[in-house]
Amino acid sequence: MHSLPRSIVSTIAYFDIFNYPLTLSELHRYLWKAPVVTMSELKREINLLPTVKFQQGLIFFQGRENLIKIRKERYLESERKFKKRMPFIKLLTYLPHVEAIFIVNSLAYQNAKNESDVDLLIISKSGKIWSTRFFTTTVAKLLGIRPKPNYTKDTLCLSFYLDASALAMHDLMNSSDDVYEIYWLRQLLPIYDPNNYAKKIFESNQWVEPYLPNAKRVLQHPHRIIKHTIWHSLIQNMLGIFTPEKILKKIQLAILPEQLKKLSGPVESSVVVLSDLLLKFHINDPRPEWTKQWEEKIKQNLPSIS
């Protein structure tokens, strides 16, 4: 547990990396290693910090007033992306063995840039992760909505699959204080979740609580949820007949780019993971650089607090 000033500055510093000023309730929710504090106590402490500003309902560091405009612009951009790609995400929910779909990364907290893609986490039926990836990536490719080397705007990034039996994600951390992974887990935004995997993931990752004790489970607005229907069951069951897991795994491994195969390795240390419980496809890992920036911002804005 940190002192309240350090918790406040640490939290603002993390979101400052992504040009995202926080509301008071967001700051309280995302307080890093926070002591017990009420909203009024938090607001009073903010006003005592010389490097922190509270303006137009948003909290940020001195000299970062431009973030107010950026947040408003990215909110509108996030809404546009969500509406544009919701029909395509809905189509994926009819494919076999898709148990749940979450929006992750910047769009999950409405901070998407104009050129950003839409990052998804897909939960597969246990033992069917390769089949799930085969069908979802094939459909996305046929529709022309997968990212291309020089174009990512509004595309669907299908780079993270998780088997329904492997919801505990502590091993994904590349250090004991992997700040990005911890915040990522508490920002998962459910879009299609008929079996309440949002709750299951939250409960399977209680190790996050000491870092973010105020971060409760995200509750999506009912109008933003794709509901499971009888048509889902019929289509999923019908298509699910044609899913030989071992064959589909061999096909995908055979056509996978060599670069991804070379980067693949253990969950805890690799940007690419090719297992029967987790599929992760990220060529670059920005987390070490983000952690460095985070620590520097904390020092700059709270140099006298250890």
Image (cartoon, helix red, strand yellow):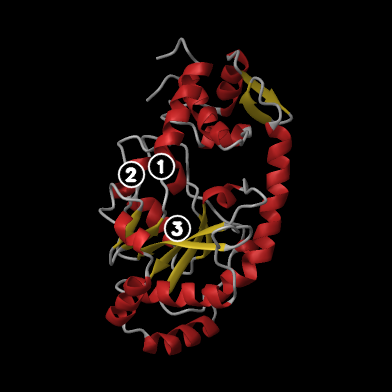
Q: Position of residue 191 (x, y in %)?
A: 55, 63
Disc 2 packing (10 Å; few <14; some 14–19; many ≥20)? some
In the displayed structure, does residue 166 sit left or right of residue 83?
Answer: left
Residue 83 in picture, x, y percent from top left: 69, 63
Chain-order first, disc 3 or disc 2? 2
> Is residue 95 found left or right of 25 in the rendered image?
left
* Other-residue count near label 3 (Cα within 10 Å), few / some / many at <14 / 14–19 / ≥20: many
Is tag 1's residue or tag 2's residue first in the polypeptide sequence? 2
Q: Secondary structure at mark 2?
A: loop
Q: Amino acid at mark 1?
A: Ile
Q: Residue at x 40, y 44 (%)?
A: 181
Is residue 113 shown above or below 254? above
Q: Indicate the position of residue 228 as horizontal and vertical percent values.
A: 53, 75
Q: Which of labels 3 and 1 is toward the front?
A: 1
**Element under disc 3:** helix
Question: What amino acid is at disc 3?
Answer: Ala
The answer to whether marks 3 and 2 mark residues whose Cβ atoms lie closer than 8 Å is: no
Separation of residues labelled 3 and 2 (CA atoms): 19 Å
Rendered-image quadrant of the N terminus:
top left
Kindly identify which residue carries mark 2: 173
In the displayed structure, 17 sits above or below 107; it is above
Q: Which residue is mark 1?
A: 182
Count neighbours of disc 1 (C-alpha within 10 A) and say few if under 14, some if 14 to 19, many if 20 or more: many
Q: Quadrant of the C terminus?
A: top left
Q: Residue 198 got which mark?
A: 3
Q: Residue at x 48, y 49 (%)?
A: 217
Q: Upstream in the sequence, badge 3 or badge 1?
A: 1
Placement of 3 over or under 119, stated as above or below: above
